[in-house]
Each structure stands twice: as C-alpha cells, then as structure tokens.
Image (cartoon, helix red, strand yellow):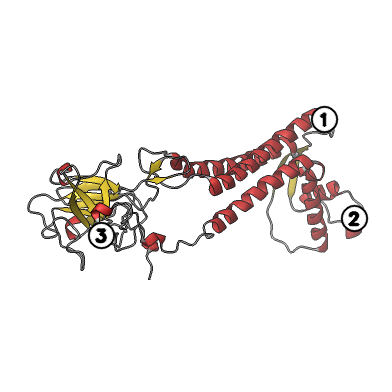
C-alpha cells in the first residue's frame, strides 16, 4: 500500500471528478481501496437490464404482499364460528403473518441482490483514527455521498426506484393501517355481554333463558357428565352468517361446565353462591373458558387438585374457590355463568343459562372501571 497522500486544497478538490475525490478521500482517511470494479462497465446491456428487472421484481412482490396484508386486514373473515360451521376465520392471523413475512423477506432479498448484482464490487482496508473534520474533509464526504448514490444506480434505474417506492410505501403504511383500523370502531358495551343474555323471543318456553349446548347443538343435560367430568359448551343460539351457515360467531361464548365429585363443595364469591346447580350445594358449575390473563383457553382440568390450567402462560384457577387464580400471571377469577335446569318437551332435563355473566369476559384489559 502507498502512504497517505497530502491533503489538497479545496480548489484542487473542486477541479476533480466525484470519483477521484471519493478515492482520494478514502486514502486520506486511511481507507485503502484494494479492488473496485463496476459490475457493468458498459451501461445498458441486456445482462444489466435482467439484473435490474430481478431486483425490481423482488420489490414488486414485497409491495403486493403489503397490499395483500391491508386487504386481508380490512376484508378478511376474522369472526369466530362454532365448530361444525365454516372455520375460515382461523386463516386470518396466519395470512397476516405470512404476508408481512413475505413483505420483509422480499424487501431484504431485493436489497441483497441489488448490492450483489448492480452496485460496484469493492474491497477496502481501513485504519481508524480520530481527528477533527476540516473543510476539505467535508467536501470529500460530500463527494463520497454523490458517488455512493451513483453506485446505487437510482438516478438512472427508474424501474427499481418505482418498485422500491411501492414496497417502501407498503411497509410504511402497514403500521398505520393496523393502528387506525384497530381504533375505528369503539367496543362500547359489547365486551360486557355475551349470547347468554335472556332472549324471550327465541326461547319463550324457558322465560328467555338460553339453552346450553354442545358444539353440535345437542342440548346438555345433567346426565351427560360423569362426576369430575368437564365439557366445553356454548349458548344454543344460531346466527346466520354471510355464507348462509348457522353458528355462534362470538368468541366470548365458550364455557366450561364442570361436574364436581361427591363430597366437593364450592366456596362461592359474594353474590354468586346460587350460580351453580342445584342452587343449594351445587353439583354443577360453569365458568368462562377464556383466561382472564391473555384470552387463551383455560381448559385443562385436574380432577385430583380441582384446578383449571391455562396452557399458554400456566395460570391456574381453583374451581372449589369459584375459579380463583392461585398461580401464574392471571389476577382475576374466571367469570361464572349462572345455570339452571329445565324439563324439555321430550321429558328430559337440560341446562339453561339463568342470565348472562355478571363480569366482563376475557383478559383484564377488557375490564371497565
């Protein structure tokens, strides 16, 4: 390597080309350019156009993935449906994640291919030092930026510039779409009500009390569970969706119906001593299946310890203390559903919800103070 050259005057620097100034500036800063070669010394060749189109294609795919994310976020099916009805809502979150991953992936691939296929090939060795910048240093830095911009090819590669603008615009728009889209509709009081609300028009024979059913809409009776058994049940209300199918669309509906073992008793919360069935010394109790920590299904029941476990973050709820949280991050008891038993037209007994939950369903941030 040659020694460090002397600093030229600003007038001498202005007389040089940006390329010469950039190389000189590198040497003055102890950055020795060992090798530098333009990928395409002859501009506008077919090979260069192919490379440019390849990079632009990556950015275009990234832009389309961003647009797809916005379309799915706005128009994709996201409402929960009861098992046995269309389950296309389950693809909503994976679709958003996949499209966002495609956007970031192809943005990254485009950047890498741009550097490898189109920008000059260069090897340098740098000796670091700390010195104050002079006017000549500032002029050299300015020239380095000019040459760097020229190396990218953006001033003459409009196809890449446009496709990069589309991809960058999509990437910048996604956070705004998610943020604004999540705040457009106020939740109001919908988080405080479920489909278990009495409905006299649909169920006049039970004074409006909503039947409790399995996922296939069979009504649940006291004889359907063995002692120590548990079942996931739903409100027996069918709602027609846009596809013409019937099913429950509210994710607040899943409920755990538990039959206690002989000798077990419930230490009820204040005002909820008669929520089970029978009202005195209940043998059956029903709690929301939605964990009050983060909304996961708290559905693992240990008969021996009488605890409900949430598999997501290991919260545990003591059933014999009205689903009080005793371990893990959950701080609020599972809401309790008041249940009763009626005799059906076939002479069999079936469970109904006496009225709606008296507490908000789901994570703690849904609570209202």
Return the residue nearer the eye: 340 or 299.
Answer: 340
Q: Is residue 2 left or right of residue 333?
A: right
Return the residue nearer the eye: 201 or 183.
Answer: 201
Name the residue located 73 percent from the left edge and 34 percent from the top edge.
Answer: 53
**Residue at the outermost bottom position:** 369
Residue 218 in picture, x, y percent from top left: 26, 41
Residue 263 in picture, x, y percent from top left: 7, 53
Report the disc number at residue 37.
Answer: none
Determine which quarter of the picture holds residue 340: bottom left
Return the residue nearer the eye: 287 or 198.
Answer: 198
Residue 322 in picture, x, y percent from top left: 20, 60
Determine which quarter of the picture holds residue 48: top right
Dot 3 falls on a residue whose secondary structure is strand
Residue wearing tag 3: 325
Quadrant of the frame with the N terminus: top right
CA gap, disc 3 and disc 1 = 70 Å
Q: Judge the density around disc 3: few (<14), some (14-19), many (≥20) Cα neighbours within 10 Å.
A: many
Name the residue located 78 percent from the left edge and 49 percent from the top edge.
Answer: 27
**Residue at the outermost top position:** 46
Q: Nearer the viewer, mark 2 or mark 3?
A: 3
Q: Name the N-terminal-most of marks 3 and 1.
A: 1
Q: Name the N-terminal-most of marks 2 and 3.
A: 2
Q: Nearer the viewer, mark 1 or mark 2?
A: 1
Residue wearing tag 2: 14
Residue wearing tag 1: 45
Mark 2–mark 3 CB contact (< 8 Å): no
CA gap, disc 2 and disc 3 = 75 Å
């Amino acid at each position: 390597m040659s020694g460090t050259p002397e600093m030229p005057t600003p007038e001498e620097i202005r007389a040089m080309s940006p390329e010469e100034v950039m190389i000189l500036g590198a040497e003055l800063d102890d950055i020795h350019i060992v090798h530098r070669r333009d990928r395409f010394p002859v501009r506008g060749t077919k090979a260069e156009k192919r490379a440019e189109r390849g990079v632009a294609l990556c950015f275009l795919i990234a832009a389309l993935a961003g647009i797809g994310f916005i379309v799915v976020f706005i128009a994709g099916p996201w409402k929960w449906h009861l098992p046995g009805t269309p389950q296309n809502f389950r693809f909503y979150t994976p679709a958003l994640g996949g499209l966002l991953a495609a956007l970031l992936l192809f943005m990254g691939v485009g950047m890498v291919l741009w550097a490898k296929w189109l920008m000059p090939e260069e090897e340098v060795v740098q000796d670091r030092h700390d010195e104050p910048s002079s006017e000549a240093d500032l002029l050299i830095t300015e020239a380095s930026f000019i040459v760097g911009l020229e190396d990218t090819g953006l001033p003459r590669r409009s196809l890449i510039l446009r496709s990069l603008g589309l991809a960058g615009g999509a990437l910048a728009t996604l956070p705004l779409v998610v943020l604004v889209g999540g705040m457009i509709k106020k939740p109001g009081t919908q988080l405080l009500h479920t489909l278990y609300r009495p409905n006299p028009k649909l169920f006049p024979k039970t004074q409006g009390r909503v039947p409790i059913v399995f996922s296939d809409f069979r009504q649940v009776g006291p004889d359907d569970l063995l002692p120590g058994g548990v079942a996931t049940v739903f409100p027996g209300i069918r709602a027609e969706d846009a596809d013409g199918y019937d099913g429950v669309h509210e994710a607040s509906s899943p409920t755990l119906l538990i039959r206690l073992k002989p000798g077990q008793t419930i230490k009820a919360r204040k005002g909820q001593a008669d929520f089970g069935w029978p009202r005195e010394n209940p043998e059956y109790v029903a709690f929301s299946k939605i964990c009050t920590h983060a909304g996961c299904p708290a559905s693992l029941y240990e008969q021996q310890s009488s605890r409900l476990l949430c598999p997501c973050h290991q919260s545990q709820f003591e059933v014999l203390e009205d689903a009080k949280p005793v371990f893990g991050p959950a701080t609020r008891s599972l809401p309790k559903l008041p249940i009763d038993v009626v005799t059906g037209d076939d002479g069999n007994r079936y469970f109904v919800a006496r009225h709606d939950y008296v507490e908000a369903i789901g994570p703690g941030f849904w609570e209202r103070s």
